[in-house]
Amino acid sequence: MDILKRYLFLYTRHRGPYFLGAVFLIATNAIALAIPRVFGWAIDDLEAGATRGLILSYAGAIVVLAVFQTVMRVGSRIFVLSVSRRIDYEMKGMLHKRLIHLAPSFFAATNTGDLMSRMTNDVMLVRALGGPGVLYFFNAFVMYALGLAYMVSISWRLTLVVFLPLPIVAVLVRILVHRVRDYVTRARIALSDLNTIVQENLSGVMVVKSFALEEAQNLRFENQSATYMDFGLREAWTRAQMIPVVGLGGGLAAVVVIGFGGRMVSAGDLSIGDLVAVMSYVGVMVMPTVALGWILSLVQRGAAALERLDEVLVAPVTISSPDSARPIGDGPLSVVIKGLNFRYDDHLRNYGGILKLDETFESGRRHALHKIDFVAKEGGYVAIVGRVGSGKSTLLKAIQHLIEVPEGSVFLGGVDVVEVELDELRQRVGFVPQDDFLFSTTVFDNIAYGQPDASRGEVDTAAQIAGLLVDLECLPDGLDTVVGERGATLSGGQRQRVAVARAILIDSPILLLDNALSNVDAETERKILDGLRANAASNAGRTLVVVSNRIGAIQDADHIYVMDEGRVVNHGSHAQLIQRPGLYADMFEQQRLSAELEKL
Amino acid sequence: MPEGRDLTVLRRLVPFIRVHSSIVVASALLLPALAASQLVQPYLIRIAIDGYLTPASRGVPGALSGLTGLVLLFVAVLFGEMIVRFAQIYLMQLAGQRIMHDLRCTVFRHVQRLSMSFFDRYPVGQTMTRVTSDVEALNDLVSQGIVSIARDLTMVVGIIGVMLWVDWRLTLASFVVVPLLLGILAFLRTRLRAAYDRVRSLVARQNAFLQETISGIEVVQAFVQERRNQKDFAKVRGDILEIELHSVRLSSWLSALVQAATTVSTALVLSYGGFGIIESTVTLGILVQFMMYLQRFYQPLEDLSDKYDTLQRAAAATTKIFGLLDVESEVREASNMVSMPHFRDRIEFKSVTFAYPSVSEAAAAAKLDEANIAISTAAPVLENFNLTIHKGEKVAIVGATGSGKSTVIKLLLRHYDVQKGSITVDGIDIRGMDQQSLRRAFGTVPQDVFMFTDTIAANVGLGVFDRESIKDAARVVEADRFIMTLPDSYDTRLGERGANLSFGERQLLAFARALAGGPAVLVLDEATSSVDSETEAQIQRALDRLIEDRTAVIIAHRLSTIRNVDRIVVLHHGVIREVGTHRELLDLDGIYARLHRLQLQEMVGADGVT
């Protein structure tokens, strides 16, 4: 419950509307309880022989009260429930603000589905706590306080007797709620096992089909589905008991009223009107009693949701701008890396409970860098080659400061990246990631992503350099074609070139390409790279760092770094590297043979 | 969500509900009992008041014992109601849960019958959602939607009936406000529903935006668009907030007006009934009885818009589920199929041509818009492919990536059907055979060495082979050595996808699995993973023992593993280019020789750096 204290501000921030909501709620409940009272008086007067005029004035009073009650009730609901919607709005804003500034390592450590579920389901629970939770809690509280007062004023003896069954009901409800929760948990586990069966069945479909295991799988699924159903039914069985218990509580109270109150009426200690009024009070007080059990579970679930949201909100922002930044200037920039060591899993541990643990070891191994020395001169063209998982992409991310590089290891134009304002740094470094991610807007918006106010002409030029012009003519709306989710309506090669155009447009002095043209044929890749260099020359020298798996595409680079298992194992020009036995020469030979095989 | 609009899709659930109709009917039969017991309670109170509590009746002898009897009767009715209520709710849950179970199993069984092309196209996550979450979404419909609507209707009709019977004039007087209320409710509810629809579509957009931001976070950060992203997100959230506040206002009025109607009706009963009492046409008891009925009458009106929401969500889920159930298997069972006979002589591929279905065809065939892009080429993978494998022969098929070699065994196992030509076993076309009997005759080692989260024994025996065959098979491929070192030997549980085993160990288990059924023919699609030389040697030894004295078809990625086979078939771009033994093919100096050199290069390369 400590978590509730820490996030209390979410709710107390809205104390104004809550206060007004509470005032309205007290008013509406006071009226709701006054109505049975008036009704009771009317009955007593009827019994004593009232006139039509008196009855009409009682009825009129009730109608007037009803109007007030309606207005108050609307007010109370609007005030309190609106706060819950605002909490939803604010909570999502807080979460998003955090997410957007977290380093990519955070996203490597978590999975999207889990984050999405926190942002939707958990926020919903937090919201329910601030809306219906607060509303019904107030309601129960006010109802009890006012109802008791009214009843005591009528007859304290009857009140005492009537309330005897209610605590028993509350206790029974509490017990049932516990058991229901237990079954819910077990049903969840059964469901998750069921999911695993489906998932394994689908992932291992080749085994299932090849060994004709369909029937065995069906049985396995049916068994687990039955187990799951079983817990669902037990839950339903327990939950269904809650209704009789609650109803019984209310009913017993009514019985007590009639039995005990009836005797009081017979003895002349109580009027019939009073008896009817008390009966109505019991009716309206049963629901709040039940609601208390429900509110309790809302609080528990809300607290659990806050815990999960807290994991996102306190996740450390591991890459941020320094307090006193150093500018890196407007001119051409060099890239220098000195003895850079980096391991992903060192940083993953920061994220605590949100981490999907099984992934850490693997990714830690895959994305390590060891003692990297690297130089790209101003306006130079440097290539990096190596096998999959050799650390090439990680190296590019280091230049962008997208990974947590240590101080004194990566320098742009002689300035340590950790001393540079992040916005400035990233504006000065264009980047085409390996994953050709596009947003589900138009081609134009995607190309202009880094510079939303770009003109049509600028976007056209970028598209032309990226070799997109011919493709644009084939698209239904040219630049205004909507690319679909993740760019699904474009081919892989087109997506990659849109991503290249996007980086060209921001016209940065450094441009990084991470295997960005792998889905384009080798000939076109080379042409685009040439175009980038030609375009760069006219812009007072753009430093080009290209990662590629294809040696043919990058052999014109000024300097080539060869990476393997997170280390630079060789570097030099193409002519030099093919002379040296090693990975580069082997890759070159392999690619030559493969190309030859292709042609056969 | 336009797919949820059409509620007629819910009709397709009828067959599933009908199976459990006895439970549904039993539950429905309890409804009148439930209504009756609720209607009787106010009546009893009326008798109590009129018979024993009014000044006139107070003095009557025996009034007190009469009241006690009445109280006992009231308690009895109450107990009756609770039991009926409990039974009714539980029965409905029982029906709901059983229907869900049936539907889940039907969907799962259906998916099991689909051929490989389905699995190529639909992402695992999507199919999982159909089988579990979408089915789950229907639970609300069955257990809360349908029945509670029926319950509310019975109640409302019952109350009106009894009230009319007791005093029709007083009834009409108390319902004067109902037409007005219904009019206002209809007005509010239409607007509320429109607001909910809008919230739903905005929330869908908000979630898509979030998902995209998370997936594209590197692009967002690399292009310094954090602020813009935040602004865009705030805009979507703001739109949602605005419409949410609007719907809060509407729903607040809705619930307050229902309550107001109850109160105003009470006032009407009081005045009209009060006049009746003065004229002695109505008793005090009736007045109280009516007042109690009114409270039960208005409550159901309030929840109706929630019910509509439930129905819509159920309709959306039903559409998705039946969309999947409508997908048909592309490999069809022949009408007069035979079991695969005992393998005697030969397997023949005759002029086989095959292309994977293209995406658009696939999407059209599946009638589902979420078709995943899996195979984008409609160009033939195999063209005029001819191959005869005799009993006892070991044939290896090699070729560069994309040459079509893995397709050969997928066709042989009938994961796909050939488009031209035929595949026969001992002269019988496999399209006329029972798929399961065909596949059981083959011992298969698929390329992806998949392990279930289960014990070693279960992974080798797959729940079909006995313990002895499992152990024998493990011994033959020498998997027993490492198995015996495990804490529970054959009963050791594997982690997800066999995570606690090395690649080599998993490969050996896959070999044992293929062998355990005592297959007539072994079919091996070698894993592409690169392995260290020790593992390689271990796998090589196991493979040699595996295919010893057996008919075997091996799709080889590492040429080193197949030097000793009888025949090597070289596939290139879907066409057989070379056939011969290892020696013959090297001497030919064609594609095989080049592939061989390429692999030698790779190995040298690997050794060169480590």
Image (cartoon, rainbow, N blue to C red):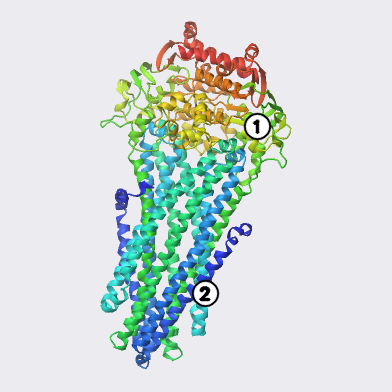
Question: Residues at badges 1 and 2 in contact (C-beta under 8 Å)?
Answer: no
Q: Which residue is mark 1?
A: A398
Helix or strand or loop: what does disc 2 sit on?
helix
What is the quadrant of the N terminus of chain A in the image?
bottom right
Instruction: Chain letter for mark 2, please.
Output: A
Task: Look at 48% across and 67% down and name the residue there.
Answer: A75
Q: Which residue is mark 2?
A: A144
Above or below — where is B255 with respect to A496?
below
What is the x, y in percent for residue B201? 42, 48
Above or below — where is A210 with respect to B209?
above
Determine if residue B550 is in view.
no
What is the x, y in percent for residue A366? 61, 31
Task: Look at 33% across and 34% down and name the residue there.
Answer: B365
Q: Classify residue A515 by image quadrant.
A: top right
Camera-side residue of A491 and A119: A491
Residue type, label 2: Tyr
Q: Earlier in the sequence, mark 1 or mark 2?
A: 2
Residue type, label 1: Ala
